Amino acid sequence: MKIILLGYGKMGQQIEKFALKRGHEIQLIVDKDNRESITAASLSGADVAIDFSEPAAAINNISLCFEANLPIVVGTTGWYEHLEEIKAVCLDANQSLLYGSNFSIGVNVFFHVNRLLAKAMSPYKQYDVQVEEIHHIHKLDSPSGTAITIAEGILDGVEGKTQWINNLVGEDEERIPKADELLIESHRIEEVPGTHTVLYSSEVDQIEFKHTAHSRAGFALGAVIAAEWLQGRKGFYQVTEMFAF
Ligand SMILES: NC(=O)C1=CN([C@@H]2O[C@H](COP(=O)(O)OP(=O)(O)OC[C@H]3O[C@@H](n4cnc5c(N)ncnc54)[C@H](OP(=O)(O)O)[C@@H]3O)[C@@H](O)[C@H]2O)C=CC1
Ligand SMILES: O=C(O)C1=N[C@H](C(=O)O)C[C@H](O)C1
């Protein structure tokens, strides 16, 4: 594949490595400094764009790819309030987009088991449930996209929880969740690549379900595999659709 890399930070650089290892070619690298280099001519002949940029940049990058009829994989998080709008444009214009809050295999298995666990725990009202996420101090969005996906799985499975709220520890004034609210506690610590924990706590015990990323390699490889998977497909996809659970 000929790949357009949108964003060349921590993730973009890792994706380039895995893409080259898997025999692909990088046609163009776009960063904040050369945003204007995305033109019909520079995108022409490419097979796919992979966006790991910034929440504020992702929407415009997606629109530019749609205009160029270029399939796009979006790993950037923090733009999901525009999801339905983008989905409608994608489907109306017969374009191809795959997005995911987390491309690692381990986290996608975690998403699946999280949904099963939520259903299993739902009848046991003596347990309260909470999500914790820890990321590096450079992260722009909170809670993490992964924590939102986990929270959505819990809200679908645990009767009585209707919405999530976030506390960014050390920055937000601490909010005490109401009975129907699911608390996501976000921590920003040093260079942590990404740790997510679901806790079910009762007076007598606690269940902890945890995923720890040791590096960004799993996310980056997953993004390249997602770009391969999107070839020849039209429509609006989530990364979870790549997995046969
Ligand atoms: N889905 C997943 O599996 C994962 C998702 N992510 C998400 O990916 C995103 C990027 O993460 P990360 O690489 O760590 O962040 P970085 O800050 O390291 O990199 C972001 C890059 O995007 C560049 N950029 C900013 N604006 C634009 C633009 N308009 N067009 C193109 N590039 C632009 C920045 O340029 P400059 O340096 O000049 O500011 C920077 O190089 C985040 O939203 C993060 O949450 C991260 C890991 C895994
Ligand atoms: O910004 C990051 O670093 C990460 N972002 C994604 C998220 O918001 O969930 C995925 C991963 O946890 C790393």
Image (cartoon, rainbow, N blue to C red):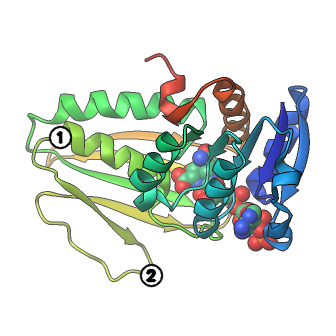
Residue at (65, 70) in percent of width and height: 138
The residue singled out by tag 2 in the image is 171
Looking at the picture, tell me which residue is in the foreground, 151 or 66: 66
The picture quadrant where one finds residue 22 is top right
Taking depth in this image into account, of 60 and 126 the one nearest to the observer is: 60
**Disc 1 residue type?**
Val
Considering only vertical position in the picture, is 212 above or below 111? below
Instruction: Identify the residue at image location x=16%, y=50%.
Output: 161
Q: CA distance from mark 2 to mark 1?
A: 29 Å
Of discs 2 and 1, which sits in the foreground?
Answer: 1
Sequence order check: which comes first, mark 2 or mark 1?
1
Q: Give the residue type that dot 2 points to.
A: Glu
Residue 211 point in image, percent of width and height:
50, 40
According to the picture, the residue beneath numbered tag 1 turns out to be 158
Residue 202 in the figure: left or right of residue 57: left
**Crowd rating for badge 2 (residues with CA inside 10 Å; few <14, some 14–19, many 20+):** few
What residue appears at the point 50 percent right and 34 percent down from the top-left corner? Answer: 237
* Cβ–Cβ under 8 Å for marks 2 and 1: no
State the image quarter where residue 59 is shown. bottom right
Q: Quadrant of the C terminus?
A: top left
Image label count? 2
Judging depth in this view, the residue of 13 and 194 nearest the camera is: 13
Is residue 194 visible in this depiction of the protein? no
Mark 1 surroundings within 10 Å by alpha-carbon count, few (fewer than 14), some (14 through 19), many (20 or more): many
Q: Where does residue 101 sit, x and y in percent of width and height?
A: 52, 47
Q: Is residue 175 above or below residue 80?
A: below
Secondary structure under tag 2 reads loop
| Relative to 145, 35 lies left or right | right
**Image quadrant of residue 132?**
bottom left
